[in-house]
Amino acid sequence: MKLLLLGATGRVGSRILDYALKDGHEITVLVRSADKLLHLTDENVRVLTGNVLDQKDVASAMRGVDAVISALGTDKATTLSEGTPYIIEAMKREGVSRIITVGTAGILQSRVSPDLLRYQSSESRQKLTRAAEEHHKAYSLLEQSELDWTIVCPTYLPDGEYTGTYRVEAHQLPVDGMQISVPDTAEFTYQQLSSSEYIQARVGIAY
């Protein structure tokens, strides 16, 4: 498969890149600084220097791919809300329907206030909601896009160890879920490439 991976230099994205390379996929990565990927010598990786906030860069990266995985963070800015429309537009232009993104448990439905998302309710322990608001905007854009999207929504995300054992639940965080490691989150996110179980769904993941 030919993949576009966004956020490939981040904690989760770099792990997803490892999984995809191990399986022999051809991967295009769009990064602001290629210096972080100088160690990559695999012929199946095409590194493009650019920015998800540049419409032309996104359009160029999207050409010829079969699916998109995005592990982009909020960057403490408006990266998601500004970049997601460019991603959706480029996907539609190129006829790409499948996108898997990494979100946050804050945009799952609240159990205590089902009409609200977790970050909007007393269920969330986060005092600052800016990151969740950015993820919410990206989720809303994907929800309206008619693409085959899946948003993997980890709760507290320490680097941690790989276990291969965790709980997932559509639209909500598994009951009493407190954390999930980076390697396990990356594995589940990557596995969605070959699964149609959570098409057009948010998926909570936790131990």
Image: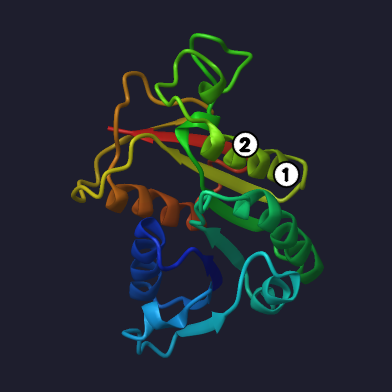
- Disc 2 or 1, which lies upstream in sequence? 2
Rendered position, 177 above or below 76: above
Q: Residues within 10 Å of mark 2 (few under 14, many from 20)?
A: many
Q: CA distance from mark 2 to mark 1?
A: 9 Å
Residue 95 image-quadrant placement: bottom right
Q: Position of residue 153 (x, y in %)?
A: 46, 38
Q: Residue at x 40, y 61 (%)?
A: 10
Mark 1 is surrounded, within 10 Å at the Cα level, by few (under 14), some (14 to 19) or many (20 or more) other residues, namely some
Decide: is 150 above or below 204: below
* Residue 109 position within the rendered picture, expressed as x and y whole percent measured from the top left: 55, 22
The residue nearer to you, when weighing 165 against 129, is 129
Q: Which residue is mark 1?
A: 141
Residue 174 versus residue 25 in the image, above or below = above
| Tag 1 secondary structure | helix
Q: Which residue is mark 2?
A: 136
Secondary structure, mark 2, is helix
Point out residue 195 in the picture as x, y percentages from the top left corner. Answer: 50, 50
Frontmost residue, 27 versus 181: 181
- Taking 175 as reference, is 87 above or below it? below
State the mark number for residue 104.
none
Identity of the residue drawn at 42% across and 26% down: 126
Residue 84, percent from left and from top: 68, 54
Which residue appears farthest toward the right when viewing the image? 93
Amino acid type, callout 2:
His
